[in-house]
Amino acid sequence: MNTQDGGHYDAAVDALAAREYEAAGDRYTRGGRRVLADPRADLDPFSADGKGWVGQGVAQLLVGTLAYRVAGAEGRATQRAVEGIAVTRDLETVLDAPAQRACLAEFVADFRVAGGLDGAADAYEAAAERYEAAADEVDSPQAVATTPLFEAAALPIKQVARGQANGEIAIKWEDLHGSDPSQPGDFLAYRARFKKRRFAGLVEKAVADRHLAAPRGTTEYGNETHRCPNCGANDVNWAGTDVLCMRCSTPTERA
């Protein structure tokens, strides 16, 4: 993380590893609110920011919503989704570049999916249309898509998906973006339409399985000093404050 979250992000990941999903939701909520209040030492969250660092706070609220859903805390998931939508819409008065506003609209749709709210499909289509309308304002869609705001909006779906793919990277850059960067509107709109097709199904499976994977950090295959006590794998993921199993997110033990 590159923002000031007071250590709550790492604590949330630790809670995911312990399968304490409601506690993870609480920590993600606290981290998200902390980032929204003070993203970085030199950054006012109510000032225009070409990088969109505050998006990392929005993403924490979104993953917190998912954690509550997986925990079976449906009411809290609904409340967090509603909070996230309100925050995200308010940020449109701050992040004023057209592509940024389209990304915020994409976040709104994500919150609808994460919280089990109605209207997600229409919200994704609205975001896609905003990306298309922003095309003339985007010189390099690849550069836009690698800013903190856009990367933050990509992380939650990747996190959910890897838990259903044996810990591997299940959603790649080319899955989320169009094939022709010379068409910036279509290139970026692809993100919203991909999520429209895939995110709800991934969330429903995570809720049914009662499992939300830890995010993917630095990984290593065939580590000789750590082994998972749950599944026996020695492929590891450095995330949170511990060394986790890359496969099932369980804290590893020294081999």
Image (cartoon, rainbow, N blue to C red):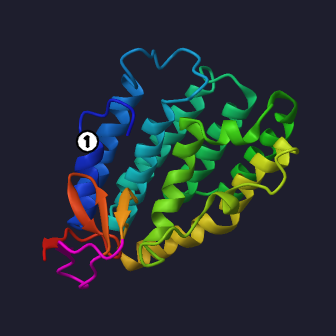
Tell me if I can see residue 16 in this picture.
yes
Residue for point 41% across, 47% down: 79
Q: Main secondary structure of the magenta part?
A: loop
Query: Measured from the top left, where is residue 57 in percent x and y?
Result: 43, 36
Using residue 46 as the reference point, say whether residue 69 is left or right of it. left
Q: Is residue 72 above or below residue 6?
A: below
Using residue 247 as the reference point, say whether residue 98 is left or right of it. right
Query: Measured from the top left, where is residue 97 in percent x and y?
Result: 71, 25
Query: Badge 1: few (under 14), some or many (20 or more) residues near its Cα, within 10 Å?
Result: many
- The residue where tag 1 is placed is 8
Residue for point 23% across, 85% down: 232
Q: Is residue 156 above or below residue 198?
A: above
Q: Residue furthest front?
A: 224
Query: Measured from the top left, where is residue 123 in percent x and y?
Result: 70, 49
Q: Is residue 180 above or below residue 182?
A: below
**Relative to the observer, which residue lies in front, 26 or 170?**
170
In the rendered image, which quarter is residue 146 located in? top right
Amino acid marked by disc 1: His
Asked if the magenta segment contains residue 162, the reply would be no
Q: Quadrant of the C terminus?
A: bottom left
Tell me if I can see residue 115 in this picture.
no
Using residue 46 as the reference point, say whether residue 134 is left or right of it. right
Using residue 204 as the reference point, say whether residue 143 is left or right of it. right
Asked if the magenta segment contains residue 232, the reply would be yes
Q: Which residues are magenta?
A: 221-234
Q: Is residue 206 above or below residue 183?
A: below
Residue for point 40% across, 60% down: 216
**Mark 1, secondary structure of its residue:** helix
